[in-house]
Amino acid sequence: MNHQDMRQTILDKFQEMAAVLGYRKVTVDMLAKKCGISKKTVYEHFKDKDEIVACTADAIMTGMREYVYNVLGSVSNPLEKLNMLFDLSFEIAGNIPEVMLFDIKQFHPQIQSEMDDFIEEISNLCIDSLKEGVAMGLFKDINPNLVITFVIGAANAVLNTDCLLKYGIAPEEALTGFRQLILTGLLREE
């Protein structure tokens, strides 16, 4: 196996294990065993575990960014764009295990900063779509920055595990209801 293929195998196995255990609990010994290689071989391809974590996080964010821009590039209607951004945001949130997010927040501030930048990038795309929708007469003329702040705050409050469990709401039901409330509240009445 060439260098690039081995690096990718190590990253894939690391991401697989981290999704269950979190970044912090996956050791290089465990990773080597999972890959069927020696610990020394892992270190021939990566300087240390921090580099593996950084590469894994970077690959996840790069994939998400490419997906977002590919999808948005195929849509011109602002309402469709917002729907897609909602779908993508919820898909992204649902595909990154909580244990990985916790480890990033606690132990990898640089990666957390990059994730925050990505969230800001998505927010700016939403703001652009909101402005475009207002200009076209599709949406009410509400400050897009206020809308995004509200959406993020409401999502954090409603779409968390404690709230869902407390009120017996299925995640899919919460996502559907949340999107309907936000998007129908933005639409102009005909």
Image (cartoon, rainbow, N blue to C red):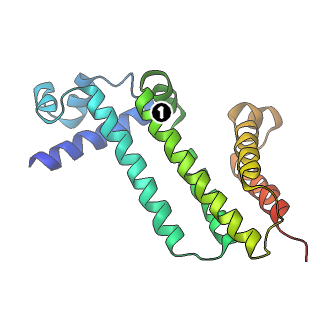
Q: Is residue 37 left or right of residue 34?
A: left
Q: Residue at x 45, y 54 (%)?
A: 64
| Residue that carries the numbered disc 1 in the rendered image | 112
94 over 41 or under it: above or below: below
| SS label for mark 1 | helix
Give neighbour class at mark 1: few <14, some 14-19, many 20+ (Cα, 10 Å).
some
Residue type at mark 1 is: Gln
* Camera sees residue 14: yes
Q: Is residue 140 left or right of residue 155?
A: right
Q: Nearest the camera: 56 or 31?
A: 56
Q: Residue at x 39, y 28 (%)?
A: 23
x, y percent for residue 21 = 43, 28
x, y percent for residue 74 = 52, 76
x, y percent for residue 125 = 59, 59
65 over 93 or under it: above or below: below
Q: Report the residue that reaches farthest toward the right.
A: 190
Question: Could you say which quadrant of the image residue 66 lies in?
Answer: bottom left
* Camera sees residue 96: no
Dividing the image into 4 quarters, which one contains the C terminus?
Answer: bottom right
Q: Residue at x 16, y 49 (%)?
A: 5
Q: Is residue 170 left or right of residue 43?
A: right
Q: Is residue 19 left or right of residue 175?
A: left
x, y percent for residue 184 = 83, 63
18 over 4 or under it: above or below: above
Q: Residue at x 79, y 54 (%)?
A: 177
